[in-house]
Image (cartoon, grey):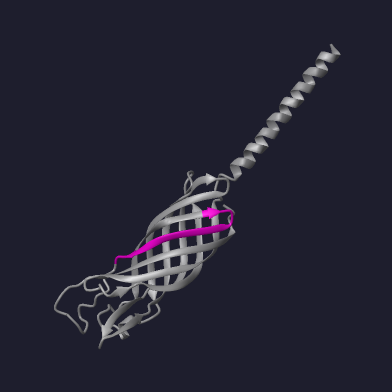
Amino acid sequence: MKNSFKIMLAVAMLFTATLSANAQLRKKVNSTRTPDRFHMGLRAGLTASTITGDYTEDAKALLFPYGGLGLDFQVAPIPLFVGIGLNYMNMGYKVEYNYNHKDETKTWDAHSIQMPITVKYHINLAPNLFLQPFLGPWFAYNLTDIDEENKDWNDDRFDYGLRFGCGLNYGRLYFDCGYDLGLKNWYDRDGRYNNDKDYTINRGLLFVTFGFNWAGER
């Protein structure tokens, strides 16, 4: 009788230990497959900005580094996040043309402070690895007065548009690429040239970002 009781007690203890170990293992595994609810860190990368629209065939992409801060936080029971950034960018463009049989390049800088606000969905691909498609508006303020150099441009320094792309988060490391589609018409109808016609000139900016999160490991 005593032996049977000891065996039953040993089995019960082994069963309890197994359940506890399994729960701890599952918790550990799941923790690497669930994104942290908040992320914040440094962002840096490269942009290629230009203009599109009427009579912009000679406009070329202006390459420029950029830097800033980025954060996102979960807003639903599912891994749905809102991301906010604050970036320093050059949203200008350059034009290549031939003058007196000589190739020349003119650059219009548009140093700007930009704030994107995006909705992200974190898709788990592997432990600590998450894919993050995103979409949302962006707003910017030009620190450079382009109108002083280009009389066809609107004198208002505020800009806005739509951002879309996809990011990748592994541990504290972050990478993304995307496109900022400008929705504001920058053509100044009261400018020096062609003020009797309506034209459309919009910005477009392709970006690649590398980052490090000091808050949020995944």
Residue 181 percent across, percent down from the top left: 33, 64
* Main secondary-structure element of the magenta-colored stretch: strand
Front in this rendered view, residue 126 or 38: 126
Say which quadrant the N terminus sits in.
top right
Identify which residue, 96 or 78, lies in the foreground. 96
Image point 50% across, 59% down: which residue?
A: 175
Horizontal and vertical percent position of residue 157 = 34, 76
Q: Where does the image place residue 64, in percent across and percent down from the top left?
A: 43, 74
Front one among 106 and 15: 106
Residue visible at 46% across and 61% down in the picture: 84
Residue 34 lies within the magenta run: no
* Farthest-out residue, left: 196
Left-right relation of 184 to 195: right
Q: On the rendered structure, is 140 left or right of 168?
A: left
User: How many marks do you count on the picture?
Assistant: 0
9 sits left or right of 85 in the view: right
Q: Position of residue 159 (x, y in %)?
A: 34, 70
Residue 89 in view in this figure: no
Point out the stretch of residues depicted in magenta.
169-183
Q: Is residue 110 visible?
A: yes
Examine the rendered structure and indicate whether residue 22 appears above or below residue 146. above
Name, please, the residue furthest toward the front. Answer: 101
Q: Residue furthest bottom?
A: 100
- Residue at the top extreme of this rendering: 1
Q: In the image, is residue 173 part of the stretch drawn in magenta?
A: yes
